[in-house]
Image (spheres, helix red, strand yellow):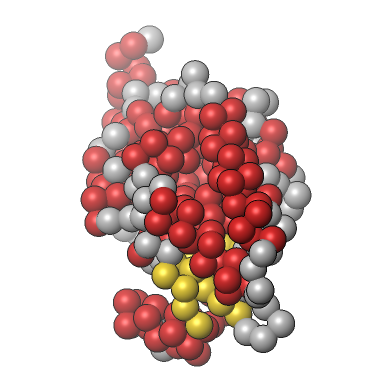
Amino acid sequence: MKPLDVSRFHQDEEFSKLLVGRRDVDLVVAALELARDADPDLSFQSTLDWIQQRADQLTLSIASCADERAMLEQLVQCLSGEFGLRGDEECYGQPESSFLPRVIETRRGLPITLSLLYCAVAERLGIALEMAPAPQHVVCRLKTDQAILYVDPFTEGRILSEAECLAWLSLRTQVAPEALLPTLKPAAPRVVIERMLLNLKNLYLKQTNWTALWSVQYRLTALNPTSVEACRDLGITAAHSGRHGVAVTLLRECAPQLSEPDKSAVMQQLAESARRLAQWN
């Protein structure tokens, strides 16, 4: 695959780290970089200030806690109890549920964005809360000396034991608990950002919002530069968003490596984009 023009990410310091395989990524800032695609004038500072204010608010109560569970209970009381952060089914159909500033404003978000806010506040308090990328539902985890505790920010911050978390996820996903256990390990920064992008991709596809999808798919393809499927999807997105020259280039490149019936569909789109391009020249 020919490399994409990653200079378009020159403002995105944290996302650019992911492109070269670095793990020292500030996930809050990286998530804000994704949100800036939808709002080019977005200021990051209000979100960063909100997170720090919640940490400052909790400092004394956390310091007086007897153990890690009590710390989690204080965190939940603040973020879910006082500020009302939680999720609902409508969040899955709203792009703003993936954007941290809007999640803070509306107090509603997806499991992954709510978990990110929980972990960001916890980090500033010295609590080693981490994101666990369980299928269909990201949760937070805290390893203590006695056990691993889980927090589900989407459902009003309920705190679960590992057994309780696995039983609930198994019921939700119809996957055996032993198969789910590896998905409860801490998520690498790239996993978090890629999953946020995939959430947006799936939603924009349902909405046939090709203009918004272009930025999302460009990021996904930049993260997976050798993926034929990512190249194909970027080419198709280019065509539907009116970038027929780009579409022709990308689809010609990936078509020989595809199998039927995918190849036939791509060739049809390639012919249509070439026809459109010829009309303009």
Q: Nearer the viewer, residue 178 or 211?
A: 178
Say which quadrant the N terminus sits in: top right
Across and down, in percent, residue 280 comes to: 34, 11
Q: Quadrant of the C terminus?
A: top left
- Residue 149 quadrant: bottom right
The residue under the point 54% across, 24% down is 43
Which one is in front, 28 or 4?
A: 28
Question: Relative to residue 174, is residue 186 depicted above or below?
Answer: above
**Point 69% across, 61% down: residue:** 63
Q: Is residue 87 above or below residue 13?
A: below
Q: Up-down: is 36 above or below 268?
A: above
* Residue 57: percent from left, percent from top: 58, 46
Percent position of residue 135, x then y:
43, 69
Residue 73: tell me if it is visible.
yes
Image quadrant where residue 248 sits: top left
* Residue 11 falls left or right of residue 77: right
For image coordinates 37% across by 51% down, the residue present is 84
